[in-house]
Image (cartoon, grey):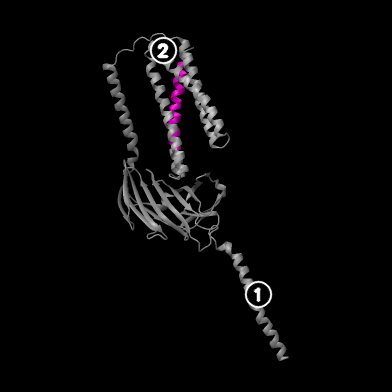
Amino acid sequence: MFLAALLIFAVLEINLPSRTTYVSHAVKTALKPLMSDSNLTMNETLQLDEWRRELVVDAFGGLSASDHYSIVNNQSEEIYRMTFLLPANASDVSLQDAYGYYSKNVLTISTQEEYTQINVTLNDALKPGERNEFLITYNLPSNRYIIKNSWQDYTLNLNLTKPENWFVKKFSLIIILPEGAEIKNLSGIEYKIEKQGLSTKVIFTEHDLVEFHESHITLEYRYFILWAALRPILWTAVAAFIGAAFFLIKRRFLQPTPVAKPVSLSILREFVESYEEKRRLLIEIESLQRQFKRGRISRRRLRLRRKSLDQRLAILNKRLAELKGQIIARAERYKEILRDLETAEAEVEALNVDIERVEARFRRGEISAEVRRRLLDEYGRIKERAENTISKVLARLQEESI
């Protein structure tokens, strides 16, 4: 009996390690997703070439912010989920990358005591060695971050947090104070100050960031609320001064407008029709360029079609120059109108070149998606204004040709 029991004990002792190893492996496999930050495991480090956080305090104490990230996948596998940490109580969160905006439905927002966690499944997985840029914009409650010490003294408090497995080559914190604000004290960090007109910009930079040397930022500043009304008052005063000066100059020096010479209605009508045809040709050329960039037409077809359009455009430009000379020769009053038309046309052509340059710089990675968007929006507004000027001039000439 003793020998039988000993034999059974020996068999169990031999088999036990194998079973224990199996169960341990199963538990580790089951827990592996729970140990990950997005799809990175706890011991993997994600590399950020740059992380720039910008906070803007407006004239009435509102606080808005944006985070720009330049991320490189230095792992051996694709990254399909990302986690970002924003300041606590962030609201109105918006996310975009270099390829476009993310729907708010795909953002999982978790509010913690010290930070707001944003989890997102990427529209396009980040492949090994690949880079992408992300921009997150959001608002912050001023009553949590800004303390009013007196009628003109304020304190801004901010805590900095990041995922533990981030390594940031360059981190920048930029705080933009309202116009007329004066810095009293900024504790705990080294910083530099930049002036842009009446605005003050505080910049803190840290390189090769593993963890923040100083995670709590306290900025004391002085701001007089009536500064908010300064700009409208200045603009009103300048406009009034210019208006008064123009009135006096016109009254004293300008001569009465000479009687206009008659202009053939057919010349005005032909000028408007030719110019409209020119605008249609330019639109068609732009459309061809876009189709070629998207791969919808071949280079050979682009070249042949563009050659035909350029020939027609050259003939129209020559005819428009002749008509313009005839119109000005017969009526001097059209000279200023046609000069406005030429100025607006030249502005549109220059803006088209600037827009192409911005797109090229973005494709080469020289500017971020946010910079590209801001530049395109600005150029687009100016271009629209110039095109509206062209349309108004043509409409006026059209009315006078009837």
Residue 338: quarter of image: top left
Residue 48: percent from left, percent from top:
45, 54
Q: Is residue 259 magenta?
A: no
- Disc 2 element: helix
Drawn side of residue 30 relative to residue 175, left or right: right
Residue 139: percent from left, percent from top:
45, 47
Q: Residues within 10 Å of mark 2 (few under 14, many from 20)?
A: some
Q: Is residue 217 above or below residue 391?
A: below
- Counting the numbered discs, the total is 2
Q: Is residue 298 visible?
A: yes
Q: Quadrant of the N terminus?
A: bottom right
Of tags 2 and 1, the one toward the viewer is 2
Drawn side of residue 285 relative to residue 345, left or right: right
- Disc 2 marks which residue? 326
Q: Is residue 402 above or below residue 54?
A: above
- Disc 1 element: helix
- Disc 1 marks which residue? 19
**231 vs 309, nearest the viewer:** 309
Q: Chief secondary structure of the magenta span? A: helix
Q: Is residue 91 above or below residue 250?
A: below
Identity of the amino acid at label 1?
Arg
In space, the residues marked 2 and 1 are separated at their CA atoms by 101 Å
Q: Is residue 392 magenta?
A: yes
The magenta span reads 376-397
Identity of the amino acid at label 2?
Gln
